[in-house]
Image (tube, grey):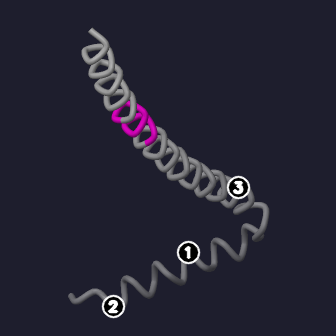
Amino acid sequence: MAVQVQGLRKAFSTLSDVLIEEVDVIRSEAAERQNEVQKQMAGQAKALKAVRRGPVACPRDSTAKGHGALYSRARRSRPS
């Protein structure tokens, strides 16, 4: 009977080691995904701030001139 109990303890120890290792892998994968999502969110927040700042940062007349200049360049470069 003692041999059976010792065998069961060893089996339980092996199973718990495997389970702990799997949990650690899942945790590290979740942490990596969280880091990726945080980086994406930071980039989106930065882009949103830039969009919000955009019209305030440059006057309308220079924006219109810039757009007109780009539009006229695009028309000139197009083959007829």
Task: Label 3: state its secondary structure.
Answer: helix
On screen, residue 77 versus residue 39, left or right, reads left
Q: CA distance from mark 2 to mark 3?
A: 34 Å
Nearest the eye: 46 or 72? 46
Identify the amino acid type marked 3: Lys
The reply to whether the magenta stretch includes residue 20 is yes
Estimate the spatial distance between the alpha carbons at disc 2 and disc 1, rounded to whole Å: 15 Å
Q: Residue furthest top?
A: 1
Circle nearer the N terminus (2, 3): 3
Measuring from the top left, give residue 37's x and y in whole percent: 52, 47
- The range drawn in magenta is 18-24
Circles 2 and 3, Cβ within 8 Å, touching? The answer is no
Q: Which residue is mark 3?
A: 49
Check disc 1 and report its element: helix, strand or loop: helix
Identify residue for label 1. Answer: 67
In-front residue for pair 24/68 = 24
Q: CA distance from mark 3 to mark 1?
A: 22 Å
How dense is the environment of label 2, judged by Cα within 10 Å: few (below 14), some, or many (20 and up)? few
Give residue 4's position: percent from left, percent from top.
25, 14
| Residue 77 image label | 2
